[in-house]
């Protein structure tokens, strides 16, 4: 696992954006909310991601996985070395983190992101006539 692999995987998830924050952290977000953070410079933690409460408790019992600094209270786990978990499991956990964050976005934002993705995949049909305006009676 390396940073290039991580970028390819996360950016393939719908609506994902990336940005460098805190000088040396590559942050992956959906709807403006982060779901994964990777260090650009070597440090004690390689990757942090959000988990469910039960999954968090199970993960931090495993060697090489610890509560994420500053984010553990929100059930974020951190991989110390990239080799702490096999690639397919990291993919599953990142997908789950993405889903947890996406599901907590406001309903309107989720609908908007989904609509944008649907429009991007399908050509937009032109309307044959404008929608009639509703006129309310005066009182």
Image: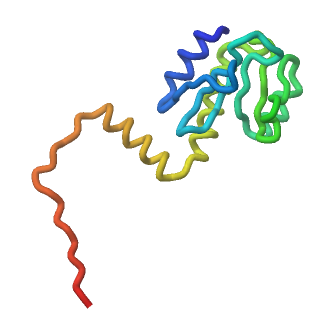
Q: Residue at x 42, y 46 (%)?
A: 112
Place of residue 114 in the rendered image (x, y in percent of width and height, measured from the top left): 42, 41
Place of residue 54 in the rendered image (x, y in percent of width and height, measured from the top left): 80, 39
Residue 9 drawn above or below residue 83: below
Place of residue 89 in the rendered image (x, y in percent of width and height, measured from the top left): 69, 20
Figure quadrant of residue 75: top right
Q: Residue at x 80, y 29 (%)?
A: 68
Q: Furthest residue to the left?
A: 128
Q: Residue at x 83, y 22 (%)?
A: 65
In the image, is 93 to the left or to the right of 57?
Answer: left
Residue 59 drawn above or below residue 82: below
Residue 58 drawn above or below residue 137: above
Place of residue 46 in the rendered image (x, y in percent of width and height, measured from the top left): 75, 16
Quadrant position of the N terminus in the picture: top right
In the image, is 98 to the left or to the right of 122?
Answer: right
Quadrant position of the C terminus in the picture: bottom left
In the image, is 110 to the left or to the right of 52?
Answer: left
């Amino acid at each position: 696992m390396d940073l290039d692999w991580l970028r390819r995987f996360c950016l393939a998830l719908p609506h994902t954006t990336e940005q460098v924050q805190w000088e040396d952290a590559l942050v992956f977000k959906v709807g403006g909310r982060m779901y994964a953070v990777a260090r650009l410079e070597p440090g004690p933690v390689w990757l942090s991601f959000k988990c469910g409460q039960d999954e968090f408790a199970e993960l931090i019992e495993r060697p090489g996985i610890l509560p994420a600094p500053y984010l553990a209270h929100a059930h974020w786990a951190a991989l110390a070395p990239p080799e702490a978990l096999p690639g397919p499991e990291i993919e599953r956990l990142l997908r789950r983190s993405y889903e947890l964050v996406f599901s907590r976005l406001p309903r309107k934002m989720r609908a908007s992101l989904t609509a944008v993705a649907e429009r991007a995949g399908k050509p937009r049909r032109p309307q044959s006539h404008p929608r009639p305006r509703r006129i309310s009676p005066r009182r």
